[in-house]
């Protein structure tokens, strides 16, 4: 993985794209600090597909999350209310 200074990445963007497609992810640094990584679309799709669900996504799913048998109501005997 090569680190490209932002000035070189801007000046030779088409070369950066070709290198990314051929060799894989490429880093771009700004003032010596790596700030972004450019990845080919195939790898991006893989990473995006492995994304874990948030609790919100999990709760809003339409598929059942577990098997839970709920007994039918009305068959259990109830206690009388306590009189005070």
Image (spheres, rainbow, N blue to C red):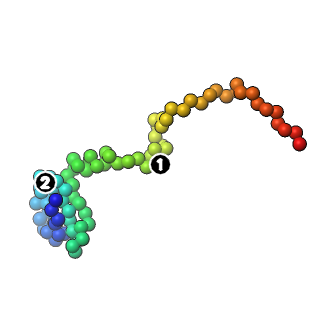
Asked if residue 80 is positioned above or below residue 27 in the image, the reply reads: above
Q: Residue at x 44, y 46 (%)?
A: 57
User: Which disc number belongs to residue 56?
Assistant: 1
| Disc 2 residue crowd, few under 14, some 14–19, many 20+, Cα 10 Å | few
Residue 59 coordinates in the image, percent (x, y): 49, 44
Work out whether residue 3 or residue 77 is closer to the camera in this orientation and state it: 77
Circle 1 or circle 2, nearest the eye: 2
Residue 67 coordinates in the image, percent (x, y): 51, 32
Q: Is residue 27 left or right of residue 14?
A: right
Residue 37 coordinates in the image, percent (x, y): 23, 60
Q: Which of disc 2 and disc 1 is earlier in sequence?
A: 2
Q: Badge 2 is on which residue? A: 23
What is the distance, in whole Å, between disc 1 and disc 2 at their CAs?
37 Å
Q: Residue at x 15, y 56 (%)?
A: 20
Secondary structure beneath dot 2 equals: helix
Q: Is residue 36 left or right of residue 84?
A: left
Q: Quick one: which residue is furthest to the top in this view?
A: 75
């Amino acid at each position: 993985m090569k680190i490209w200074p932002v000035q070189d990445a801007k000046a030779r963007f088409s070369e950066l794209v070709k290198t990314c497609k051929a060799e894989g992810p490429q880093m771009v640094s700004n003032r010596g600090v790596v700030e972004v990584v450019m990845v080919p679309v195939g790898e991006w799709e893989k990473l995006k597909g492995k994304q874990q669900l948030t609790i919100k996504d999990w709760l809003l799913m339409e598929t059942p999350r577990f098997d839970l048998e709920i007994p039918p109501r009305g068959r259990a005997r109830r206690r009388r209310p306590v009189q005070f």
